Image (cartoon, helix red, strand yellow):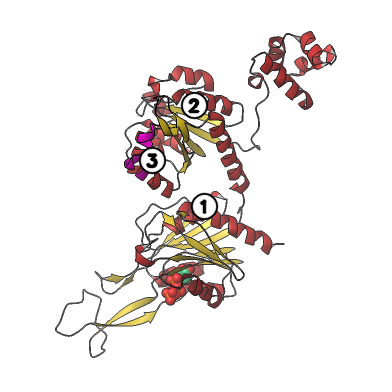
Amino acid sequence: MNNISHLISLLGGTGSVAEKLKIKPSAVSNWRKLNKIPKNKISAILSISSQLKINAEDYLPRKNLNNFNVKILLIICGGIASYKSLEIIRLMKKTNIDLEVVITKSAQQFITPLLVTSLIEKKCYTDLFSVENESKMNHIMLARKPDFILVAPATANIMAKLANGIADDLASTILLASFSQIILAPSMNPVMWSNLATQENYQKLLGRGIEFIEPDVGEMACGESGTGRFPEPKIIFEKIVSNINKRKNTTDQFKDVSIIITAGPTIENIDPVRFISNRSSGKQGFAIASEFSKRGARVTLISGPVNIPFPKCANIIQVTTAKEMFEETMSQLPADILICSAAVADWKLVPESSSKKKINNENKIKKTKQELLFKTIKNPDILATVAKSNLRPSIVVGFSAETNNVIKNAKSKLVSKEIDLIVANDVGENKVFGDDFNKVFIIDENNCEEWSEQSKKSVASNLADRINKIFINSYI
Ligand code: CTP
């Protein structure tokens, strides 16, 4: 028996359904034959079903989430809310989401792998080291396959593991080995949630661009009340769907668009052991490269020396000096967009003796009784040179690091370097450099927008939206 035929039988059969809907029995027979209910009758069928406490949605065709074949990995951690994730699975199963599920050891105190397997109609995963898994779908494949990883409920424990890079079971190992968007839906006792350790982990994870579906306020199963309740599964599902839609709308946004991004500091050697540089970590530029890659752009990332992992993007060029960064940038032209987020060393230092004689710096410079002096030689301005060249990309974006007169100085760089947009930040008192959060002003020739403090990943995403607007307008 097909699905629709089965549903109609549950609703009392052809005659009964036809009578309730005031239509001819032959029409209902046709639905049974074609395994299809006309769109304008679906809400009536849903209403009769709910009166009879039958879940009609289980028999109706799956909702197609905009033809976007999204892959989600759901990690269920142990807690009183574990069972609520079964409802999330049920809702996802009604869509074309390709779902895999991992259950942690403690979640198995609340729900069984068999229960989950019967809901998802395929194997769910529990063990890090299993001969069968390793041959078919090992932890790295589980980590790499999904577009999104939803951890629901997320315990204080999994937050702590992820924040501190602990990989001691399948769930935590996958989280560490993944490039996917991770979304956590925490649920825990209110005191555990407000504990400084959990809050510090929460901030750390937010800063790394991990998304949260915030816990609700209310009475908990343990009898205490406060913040920590697991949000309703339907709310979690809706947030995931809205994330999917956003991803879908932006996936090919910059398809076939070539972008050069400079990032990190540059280093100018004084001698083989000493150098001049700055505090740039490269985090903001890397987040931008990653965001544009996700949106389909052909990204070339030209990076100075950094201590952070490289993002996934088409082309990565590592340089040390400003001169190398300049030459590599020029060699990548033409391009559609240039974003210079690098903190380029403005000068090279040439060591001189007090009598202004150049000192041999091929080997380590030795201390003498004489003062050591430095002559400064200006490095090329990459941003200004490209913006003023005849290979100028259609959009040129710069950054402005200032300790005072942040907006005024940024505006004057916008004009003098002849660029379209400048992202200004206050780098005084060691702010911004190395941090996971950023507070920026976005300035073009007409406006200055102040953005609230947010993760560098979120700045990257909002900047991509902003550049997309300019990009569209430049073709109208
Ligand atoms: N920039 C560049 N090449 C340089 C210096 C700066 O491409 N040699 C770019 C940076 O990547 C940034 C912008 O110019 O996008 C502004 O850099 P910033 O360090 O804020 O200012 P500077 O132009 O170096 O001027 P100053 O140091 O005097 O503020």
Task: Determine whether label 3 and label 1 are within 8 Å by CB.
Answer: no
Give the label on residue 176, or none.
Answer: 3
Q: Amino acid at mark 1?
A: Glu
The magenta segment: 187-200
Q: CA distance from mark 2 to mark 1?
A: 29 Å
Give the label on residue 85, or none.
Answer: 2
Residue 87: x %, y % from top left: 53, 24
Q: Amino acid at mark 3?
A: Leu
Q: Residue at x 63, y 20 (%)?
A: 58
Task: Determine whether label 2 and label 1 are within 8 Å by CB.
Answer: no
Label 3 CA crowd tier, 10 Å (few <14, some 14–19, many 20+): some
Residue at disc 2, secondary structure: helix
Q: CA distance from mark 3 to mark 1?
A: 19 Å
Dividing the image into 4 quarters, which one contains the C terminus?
bottom right
Instruction: Mark yes or no: residue 304 visible.
Output: yes
Residue at disc 1, secondary structure: helix
Dividing the image into 4 quarters, which one contains the N terminus?
top right
Q: CA distance from mark 2 to mark 3?
A: 22 Å
Name the one closer to the observer, 108 or 174: 108
Instruction: Mark yes or no: residue 165 visible.
Output: no
Based on the picture, tell me whether residue 418 belongs to the magenta stretch. Answer: no
Label 2 CA crowd tier, 10 Å (few <14, some 14–19, many 20+): many
Choose the circle earlier in sequence order: 3 or 1: 3
Helix, strand or loop: magenta stretch = helix
Give the label on residue 291, or none.
Answer: 1
Q: Which quadrant would residue 375 be assigned to in this image? A: bottom left
Name the one closer to the observer, 382 or 315: 382
Q: Amino acid at mark 2?
A: Ser
Relative to 176, say whether 421 is above or below: below
